[in-house]
Image: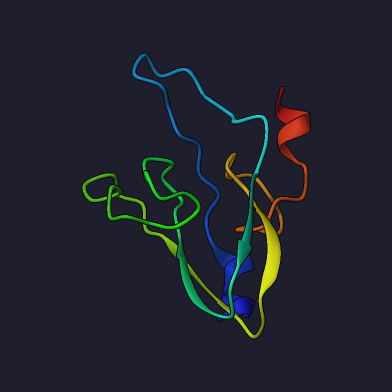
Amino acid sequence: MAGALGDLPRTTRLQPKGVAMYPTSPIEAILPEGQHVICRCGRSKLQPHCDGSHKGSGMMPVVIELSQEHQVSVCRCGKSRSFPYCDSTHKDLL
């Protein structure tokens, strides 16, 4: 599954008036071993996990598999070359 992550399209959330919005920091989380469904739309109240709030947005979450507990920085700007992991690209978007 990890090999497919780099093939995902990059997305930008839009504010109601169409202005691009880039969060200035990733979500830091310690995730246990196992499968995780990571939010891409930014609407989930369970960040970084998906809660289904993307329905109707045209976006789908990303599924990752961890072989052991791991601290991660989850991208929120949607522009990371290592998506769903942050690579600090958000700093270049400000």
Camera-nearest residue between 30 and 58: 30
Residue 37 image position (x, y, % from top left) = 44, 66
Total number of numbered discs in the rendering: 0
Q: Is residue 59 above or below residue 6?
A: above
Farthest top residue in view: 17
Residue 53 image position (x, y, % from top left) = 28, 47
Residue 2 image position (x, y, % from top left) = 62, 77
Q: How is the image coloured?
A: rainbow
Image-quadrant location for residue 15: top left
Looking at the image, residue 92 sits to the left or right of residue 54; the answer is: right
Residue 63 image position (x, y, % from top left) = 47, 71
Q: Is residue 32 above or below residue 21?
A: below
Image-quadrant location for residue 14: top left
On-image quarter of the N terminus: bottom right
Image-quadrant location for residue 60: bottom left
State the residue at coordinates (71%, 63%): 71
Farthest bottom residue in view: 67
State the residue at coordinates (36%, 14%): 17
Camera-nearest residue between 89 and 36: 36
Farthest left residue in view: 56
Camera-nearest residue between 45 and 60: 45
State the residue at coordinates (44%, 57%): 49
State the residue at coordinates (72%, 22%): 94
Looking at the image, residue 11 sits to the left or right of residue 92; the answer is: left
